[in-house]
């Protein structure tokens, strides 16, 4: 009998090596290589055909018939927003997040809502028994005759039941617990995840079944398994939040049917997840009046403007090198803004420890937050409070200019709706539009001019 051929595969990125390596040369992770058997080419089932086994031929683009199917709306408007307007029939959606963040709770609620629209839902769990899922369903108030529970990890049996039941929606919780019998490697390995996902993709595209897949995440926050897993699916959603707080953020990082910048905010309650329709009020409700180091920014998350408080705390450095710590903000952006403040505004910050955060647990990464960052840092350094009725929008260049930003009308309207009396924006954004009359719009051209008007 011939000896089985093996290879070592990195469980973080899928890199293959003929021998064991302590450190992966591709992703740089340590002790991630696992030995896997190389299956003969004749025994591996090709599950990447999207036509269900039928022979297809090349077609002209003009000759392809497009049947536009309406999106299915759930009762969670925030989820519909992140998905681009609702659930697309025949799509493959991957949801990742930390353990205990609420992925299974969200999908069980969505399963109950989709089953009430007339569709059949098959909930496949590889981590919980049917009794355990039923207990959670009772707590969430989920009850429907069209929702089926199926605790199973064997993909051949799952495939057979899908072909027999022909459900409209399938939930796989989670993809790391599923196994393809023809693959000899361990459950959760790169080969297993790749093959299971390819089979789920074939089912979704050939039968028009919408499949939601739960993915575990690594310590770094990325979805566990090969990166090809995220490339194969149609939509990748990250469920984020602090386990010590009740608010959860659903963020789209890939979406073939909508924007990748959309954001949905939920609150975890006793009876499940409730959508937060006005997140700006939450991010601002605990702000102190006349607080130093505080600035409000109007940030765009997809098509939605939200107001977030940026907080900064500067203290004299005890050691030789000053510290730069940022939570919810890009640390490199913070260092860049502090360098511009030191060079263009004559603030001596090189001997100051700086601690910055975006309140509420939200992550901000767009250029329009630069001006609010600079104001919060200068406010803490000068120990001078900002006006609680003001907010700030603008990108700062390295020469100290305040550059124009997009969607300025929506930002100003949102600030006005929440009761702010004054907003500082780039001077070039004042052209070609009419500002609302219930809020004072002030244009600034340079960082020095902004600091003089705001913190004088």
Image: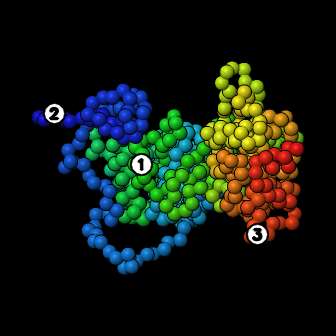
* Mark 3 residue element: loop
Which of the labelled discs sits on residue 433, or is there none?
Answer: 3
Local packing at callout 2 (Cα closer than 10 Å; few below 14, some 14-19, many 20+) is few
| Residue at the limit of the structure toward the top, as seen here | 319
Q: How is the image coloured?
A: rainbow
Residue 45 vertical placement versus 258 (above, below): above
Which of the labelled discs sits on residue 3, or is there none?
Answer: 2
- Mark 3 / mark 2, whichever is N-terminal: 2
Can residue 220 be seen from the camera position used here?
yes
Real-space Cα separation, disc 3 to disc 2, in angstroms: 74 Å
Q: Nearer the viewer, residue 81 or 406?
A: 406
Can residue 272 be seen from the camera position used here?
no
Q: Quadrant of residue 163?
A: bottom left
Residue 444 vertical placement versus 350 (above, below): below
Residue at left 86%, top 38%?
A: 384
> In the figure, is residue 389 to the left or right of 165?
right
Horizontal and vertical percent position of residue 182 = 27, 45
Real-space Cα separation, disc 3 to disc 1, in angstroms: 45 Å
Which of the labelled discs sits on residue 229, or is there none?
Answer: 1
| Residue at the limit of the structure toward the left, as seen here | 1
> In the figure, is residue 170 to the left or right of 301?
left
Q: Nearer the viewer, residue 282 or 305?
A: 305
Quarter of the figure with the C terminus:
top right
């Amino acid at each position: 009998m011939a000896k089985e051929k093996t290879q070592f595969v990195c469980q973080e990125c899928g890199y293959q090596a003929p021998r064991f390596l302590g450190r992966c040369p591709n992703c740089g992770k340590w002790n991630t290589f696992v030995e896997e058997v190389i299956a003969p080419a004749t025994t591996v089932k090709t599950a990447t055909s999207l036509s269900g086994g039928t022979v297809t031929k090349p077609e002209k683009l003009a000759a392809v018939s497009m049947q536009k199917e309406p999106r299915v709306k759930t009762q969670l408007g925030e989820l519909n927003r992140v998905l681009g307007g609702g659930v697309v029939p025949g799509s493959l959606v991957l949801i990742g997040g930390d353990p205990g963040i609420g992925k299974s709770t969200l999908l069980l609620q969505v399963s109950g809502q989709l089953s009430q629209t007339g569709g059949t839902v098959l909930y496949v769990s590889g981590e919980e028994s049917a009794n355990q899922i039923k207990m959670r369903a009772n707590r969430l108030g989920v009850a429907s005759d069209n929702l089926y529970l199926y605790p199973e990890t064997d993909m051949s049996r799952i495939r057979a039941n899908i072909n027999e039941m022909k459900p409209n929606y399938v939930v796989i919780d989670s993809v790391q617990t599923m196994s393809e019998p023809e693959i000899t490697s361990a459950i959760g390995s790169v080969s297993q995840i790749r093959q299971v996902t390819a089979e789920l993709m074939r089912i979704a595209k050939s039968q028009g079944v919408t499949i939601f897949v739960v993915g575990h995440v690594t310590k770094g926050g990325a979805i566990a398994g090969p990166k090809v897993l995220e490339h194969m699916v149609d939509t990748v959603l990250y469920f984020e939040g602090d386990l010590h707080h009740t608010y959860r953020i659903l963020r789209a990082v890939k979406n073939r049917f909508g924007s990748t910048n959309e954001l949905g905010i939920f609150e975890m309650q006793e009876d499940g997840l409730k959508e937060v329709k006005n997140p700006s009020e939450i991010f601002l409700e605990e702000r102190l009046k006349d607080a130093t180091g505080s600035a409000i920014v109007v940030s765009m998350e997809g098509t939605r403007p939200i107001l977030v408080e940026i907080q900064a705390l500067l203290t004299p450095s005890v050691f030789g090198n000053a510290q730069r710590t940022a939570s919810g903000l890009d640390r490199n952006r913070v260092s860049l803004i502090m360098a511009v403040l030191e060079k263009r505004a004559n603030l001596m910050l090189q001997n100051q420890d700086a601690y910055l955060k975006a309140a509420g647990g939200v992550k901000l990464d767009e250029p329009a937050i630069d001006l609010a960052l600079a104001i919060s840092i200068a406010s803490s350094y000068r120990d001078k409070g900002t006006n609680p009725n003001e907010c700030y929008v603008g990108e700062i260049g390295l020469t100290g200019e305040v550059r124009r930003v997009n969607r300025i009308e929506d930002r100003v309207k949102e600030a006005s709706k929440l009761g702010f009396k004054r907003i500082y924006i780039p001077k070039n954004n004042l052209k070609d539009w009419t500002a609302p009359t219930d809020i004072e719009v002030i244009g600034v051209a340079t960082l020095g001019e902004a600091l003089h008007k705001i913190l004088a």
